[in-house]
Image (cartoon, rainbow, N blue to C red):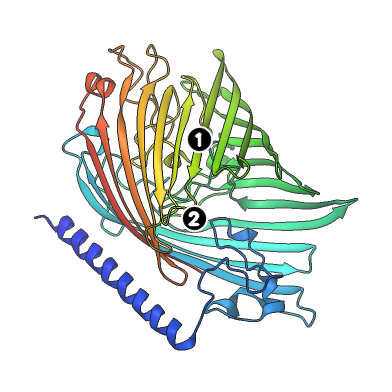
């Protein structure tokens, strides 16, 4: 057995023992001190709600601690008043994430087996100066201690960025009539809707980030976010340059548009993207995406649904085209069953020329991340249930087909899958099974374990190596 597999086994064992120990310790402390508030987003009182710790840390408002006082471990650093009124204050937070990945037949090739650890460390500081001004800075350090010996190696865009800023922006807040307006400038991240079009890609070791400007306009139950920003290229070992400058190609890839949400109704958006055209040294390619999304429960029936559709206009120096994408599901929750299972069936698809922009493909086309939305139809179904309190187990099954058998398909990054040549008319690409289990092993700490298997189909078999892929991972994450 080689050194990497021995290392992986030790890491998995240590993860399990540490998780069990942390859970036992926290349970003991809870019994001894009768602490009840171990869920971060639980209301301290019926009137005051603690912020939920998610990916967009800048959305957390810890000024609620001015009313409730400190009640949890990290509360003393979440709200640090700097004046008597308490409206000038600092807030600190961070994240530590460790994930072991085990791959077999990566890229459908038998020789591509590897085991490695992905490490991510983050810290942020949030300064509020009354309700009118705010500065938010977040730094990160991501790396792979023992390298990644798969095609692409240790990838700068996804795997390693040894010291940089994921966010560094200032907000100016004011009122205009009945509207609350925020003007934001600097380095920032975007999470729009269900992230089918724009995402900071939290699954990867590195986050996506942009340099530019955005605004937030809130009027009653309507929120509109206009934006104009350049994607920041990642430098693995050096501090990333400011995007949109000569050092980063003068902003060869930028996004612009507006995303609007109305509570109880849904989302409406326009997103444009400009990038260097394929095969062109100075020409630009544009995509203009107009879409809408709605998600809701269906009365008291137990049914829920989500639907998103978008139309796209594509232009470059040599060609104009049209494209589209669809996505969504219909689900049902068995509320009277002890494990409260939720079952669903759904569809994700995109036409052959569809520009993915900057999506979270990981959530929609299988956790192995073998395929992208371009020219793909994904019929999916799944089950989620909770056999014991706080433990969530989910299984998803995907069946992939080409939307147009005269065209190739794309990778998760949007590139051509095995080139543009298509020696087969087969539509069936393959199937994937994903199984995940998530459990909060201690306050602020979660354990995620997953296994995925891709069954290669006729199209993959006809276009190259077609070994089935196995992907196993275990992840511990602390967020505070």
Residue linked to disc 1:
329
Query: In the image, which disc is placed on residue 291?
Result: none
Q: How many marks?
A: 2
Q: Quadrant of the N terminus?
A: bottom left
Taking 245 as reference, is 28 above or below it? below
Identify the image quadrant of residue 195.
Answer: top right
User: Residue drawn at (42%, 35%), measured in percent from left and top?
Assistant: 413
Looking at this view, name the residue that lies furthest to the left.
Answer: 1
Element type at mark 2: loop
Instruction: Specify whether residue 204 is in view.
Output: no
Q: How many residues crowd around disc 2 within 10 Å: few (fewer than 14), some, or many (20 or more)?
A: few
Can you tell which of label 1 and label 2 is closer to the viewer?
1
Q: Position of residue 270 (x, y in %)?
A: 67, 32
Query: Distance from label 1 to label 2 (Cα)?
Result: 41 Å
Q: Are marks 1 and 2 in contact (CB under 8 Å)?
A: no
User: Residue drawn at (33%, 70%), measured in percent from left and top?
Assistant: 19
Q: How many residues crowd around disc 1 within 10 Å: few (fewer than 14), some, or many (20 or more)?
A: some
- Asked whether, in this view, residue 413 is left or right of residue 269, the answer is left
Q: Position of residue 264 (x, y in %)?
A: 70, 43
Identify the image quadrant of residue 166.
Answer: bottom right
Query: In the image, which disc is placed on residue 239?
Result: 2
Q: Position of residue 355 (x, y in %)?
A: 52, 27
């Amino acid at each position: 057995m080689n050194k990497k597999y021995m290392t992986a086994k030790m890491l998995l064992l240590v993860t399990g023992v540490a998780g069990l120990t942390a859970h036992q310790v926290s349970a003991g402390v809870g019994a001894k001190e009768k602490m009840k508030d171990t869920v971060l987003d639980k209301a301290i009182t019926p009137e005051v709600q603690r912020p939920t710790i998610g990916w967009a840390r800048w959305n957390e408002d810890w000024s609620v601690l001015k009313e409730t006082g400190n009640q949890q471990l990290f509360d003393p650093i979440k709200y640090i008043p700097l004046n008597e009124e308490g409206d000038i204050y600092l807030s600190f937070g961070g994240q530590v994430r460790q994930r072991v990945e085990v791959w077999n037949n990566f890229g459908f090739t038998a020789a591509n087996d590897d085991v490695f650890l992905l490490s991510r460390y983050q810290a942020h500081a949030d300064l509020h100066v009354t309700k009118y001004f705010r500065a938010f800075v977040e730094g990160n350090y991501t790396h792979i201690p023992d390298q990644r010996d798969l095609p692409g190696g240790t990838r700068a865009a996804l795997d390693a960025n040894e010291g940089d800023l994921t966010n560094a922006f200032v907000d100016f807040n004011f009122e205009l009539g009945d509207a609350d307006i925020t003007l934001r400038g600097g380095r920032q991240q975007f999470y729009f809707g269900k992230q089918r079009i724009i995402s900071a890609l939290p699954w990867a070791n590195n986050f996506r980030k942009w340099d530019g400007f955005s605004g937030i306009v809130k009027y009653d139950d309507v929120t509109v976010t206009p934006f104009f920003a350049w994607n920041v290229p990642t430098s693995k070992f050096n501090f990333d340059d400011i995007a949109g400058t000569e050092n980063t190609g003068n902003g060869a890839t930028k996004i612009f548009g507006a995303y609007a949400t109305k509570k109880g109704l849904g989302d409406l958006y326009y997103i444009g993207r400009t990038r260097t055209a394929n095969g062109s040294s100075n020409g630009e390619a544009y995509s203009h995406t107009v879409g809408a999304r709605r998600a809701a429960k269906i009365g008291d029936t137990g049914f829920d649904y989500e639907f998103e559709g978008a139309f796209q206009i594509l232009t470059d120096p040599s060609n104009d085209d049209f494209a589209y994408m669809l996505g969504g599901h219909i689900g049902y929750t068995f509320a009277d069953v002890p494990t409260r299972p939720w079952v669903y069936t759904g569809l994700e698809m995109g036409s052959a020329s569809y520009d993915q922009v900057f999506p979270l493909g990981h959530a929609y086309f299988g956790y192995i991340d073998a395929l992208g939305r371009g020219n793909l139809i994904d019929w999916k179904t799944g089950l989620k249930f909770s056999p014991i309190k706080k433990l969530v187990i989910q299984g998803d099954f995907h069946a992939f087909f080409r939307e147009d058998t005269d065209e190739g398909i794309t990778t998760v990054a949007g590139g051509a899958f095995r080139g543009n040549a298509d020696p087969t008319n087969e539509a069936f690409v393959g199937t994937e099974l994903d199984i995940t289990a998530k459990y909060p092993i201690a306050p602020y700490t979660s354990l995620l374990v997953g296994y995925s298997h891709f069954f290669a189909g006729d199209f993959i078999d006809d276009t190259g190596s077609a070994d089935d892929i196995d992907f196993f991972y275990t992840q511990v994450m602390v967020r505070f």
